[in-house]
Amino acid sequence: MASGQMAVLARDAVHDDLAVVDVLIRALERRDRLSDRERAALAAAVGEMRTHPTGDTLIRAGAPAEYSTLLVSGMLGRVFFMSEGKRQVVALHTPGDFVDLHSLLLKRLDHDVIAMSEVRVALFPHAALRRLTETEPHLARMLWLLTVIDAAIHREWTARLGHSAAVRIAQLLCELHARLSVIGLATPEGFAVDLTQADFGDMTGLTPVHVNRTLRKLREAGLAVVRDGYASIPDVARLREFAGFDPTYLYLENQPR
C-alpha cells in the first residue's frame, strides 16, 4: 500500500475514534475547553465498542472491573434489586456519561448497570485511563468533574423523593431536557425518551399506576406529554416553574477547571 493511502487510512481512523467520543467531548466542553491533544487522547483510550439490547445487564454488582464504560447512545440505569424483587433505579445515564468511571479506583461496583433502551457503549481499559490521567492532568480533572457531577445528581434525586408525584416527574423531565440539550439531543420542544411508565416509577419511587395518573395530570395541564417514545414540552420555562427546577446541580457553566 502506498504511503499516501496509509496516511488517509490513519486519518480516517482518528476521525472515527473522535466520532465515538464526540458526546463526551460535548459534555466536557460545556464546562471547560479541551485542547486538540486532549481530544485525541480521549479517542486513543477507547478499547472497543459494544451494543446491548434493552434490559441487558452490562455490569454486575461485585464483578471485577477492568474497564470503564462511556455511553454513546441510548440510556443506562444504575439499579439496585430489593429483597422483595422490586428494583430501584438510582441514576439514569444519557449519552456522554461515563457510567462507571469511579470503578477505576473502586475496582468493582456495588450495583448493576442495565440498558434502559438499546445502547451503544465504548469501553475504556483501566490501563489506558491510568495513562491518560498521568499524562493529561487537566483532562484528569475534567473526568473527576464528571464523577463529582454524578454525585450531585444523585443527591438531587434523593431530595426529589420528598416532593409530590407531579413535581418528581416534572423535575426528571426538566433534568433530562437539560442534560440532552448539552449534547444536542433535545430541542426546545422536547426529546426522545425510550422509557416505560414502569421505568419512570422505578426512578421516582412511584407505582406504574401512579405514574400513569401523574403523566395524565401533566398532559391535561399543558405542561408535558410523554407518549410513543417522545417527551413533548410546549413551554420549557413553564414546566421548570411548575417543577421548581434549578439546574445549578448540573454545573453547566463554562470555566477553567
Image (cartoon, rainbow, N blue to C red):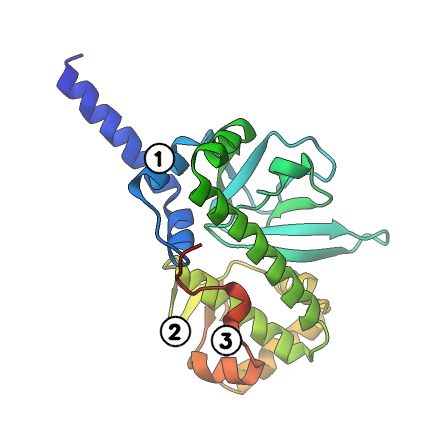
Name the quadrant of the N terminus: top left
Disc 2 vs disc 1: which is toward the camera? 1
Disc 3 vs disc 2: which is toward the camera? 2
Secondary structure type for disc 3: strand
Q: Earlier in the sequence, mark 3 or mark 2?
A: 2
| Nearer to the camera, 13 or 156 | 156
Crowdedness of circle 1 by 10 Å Cα count: few (<14), some, many (20+)?
Answer: some
Which quarter of the picture shows residue 255?
A: bottom left
Which residue is label 3 attached to? 225
Residue 70 x %, y %: 50, 42
Which residue is label 2 attached to? 189
Residue 102 in sight from this viewpoint: yes
Distance from label 2 to label 1 (Cα)?
A: 31 Å
Residue 73 in sight from this viewpoint: no
Q: Which mark is residue 178?
A: none
**Residue located at (43% from left, 45% from top):** 138
**Residue located at (64% from left, 37% from top):** 105
Name the quadrant of the C terminus: bottom left
